Image (spheres, grey):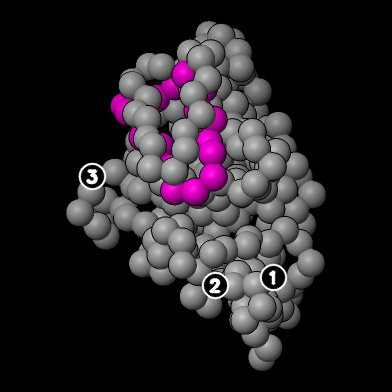
Amino acid sequence: MTEDTCGTHDLAERGRVTTGRPLGSDGTPTDGPALELDPDGRPAELLRRSPRPLVSGPSAGTWATLLETPDEGDTDRPVLVQWLVPDATAPPGHVHPTTETFEVLSGELTVVRDGAERVLEPGESVTVQPGVEHTFRNGTDALVAFRAVLPSMLTVASLYTVWGLDHEAGTGSGGRPGPLRGLVIMADTYDETTVTVAPVPVQRLLWATVGRLARALGVDGIDESYLEDRFWERHVEQPAL
C-alpha cells in the first residue's frame, strides 16, 4: 500500500496529510473530495485523539469526527470536530431547546444568530442560547475546522444519516436527502431541532399528511445504523496521523 492510499500524500515535501476521500467498492480512495490536514495543527491532534472514525458528507463539503459522547466521555453532550471547505453547504436556520457551542480551531467560521453575523477566528467561541435561530458557514476561501458541543446524540444521528445517504447516493445528492426523506428526518428531530424555513404549523401539517404517507410507503427518517464505525470505515479514507 502506498503512502497516498493509506492517507498521506507528499508528506515529506508538503508537510500535509491528504485523507477523507470516499472509498470505492474495492476499498481504495476515489478522486472525490479530500481533506488536507496539517499534522501538527490542533484539528489533527483532536482527530488523533478521537475514539471514532472520520466521517464525511462529500457533496456538502464537510468532514467530522465524534470526539466525545455522553456514553464514552466526561460530557453530557456529544462533542463533534467538523471541517468545512469553502462554499460548503450551510445548514438551514434552526433553533434548539438547549445551547449549542462553537469553538474555532483553524480558519474562520461565520455564525449567524437571529440574522446577526459573527466571524470567529481560532481560539474564539460562541454559545447559541436556547430558542435562538442560528446557522453557520465557511465564508472564506480556506478550510475551517471547529469544535461543536451539540444538543444531544439525536443531532449527531440526524447529521450522520444525511451524510451516510450522501455516500450511498454516490455523492450526487447535493449533500441533502430527497424531499420525502428530509421531511421525515425533520419530523424525527422536531423535539430537539426545529428548522425555520417554514412556520411550525405548516411543518406539522406536512408531517401529519405527507410525512405519514411517506412512512407508510416505507420512507425512513433517522437511521442510527449510520452511527456505526464500520459504515464509515468502509466509505471514508481514514487518516494516518
Asked whether the beta carbons under mark 3 and mark 2 sit within 8 Å of each other, the answer is no
Separation of residues labelled 2 and 1 (CA atoms): 13 Å
The chief SS type of the magenta part is: strand
Q: Which mark is residue 76?
A: 3
- Mark closer to the chain start, 1 or 3: 1
> Do we see residue 194 in this rendering?
no
Q: Which mark is residue 23?
A: 1
Asked whether the beta carbons under mark 1 and mark 3 sit within 8 Å of each other, the answer is no
Amino acid type of the residue that numbered disc 2 sits on in the rendered structure: Pro
Going 60% across and 13% down the picture, which residue do you hit?
A: 198
Which quadrant would residue 215 be assigned to in this image? Answer: top right
> Do we see residue 196 in this rendering?
yes
Amino acid type of the residue that numbered disc 3 sits on in the rendered structure: Asp
Q: Height in image: 186 above or below 40? A: above
Separation of residues labelled 1 and 3 (CA atoms): 33 Å
Amino acid type of the residue that numbered disc 1 sits on in the rendered structure: Leu
- Residue 131 horizontal side relative to residue 237, left or right: left
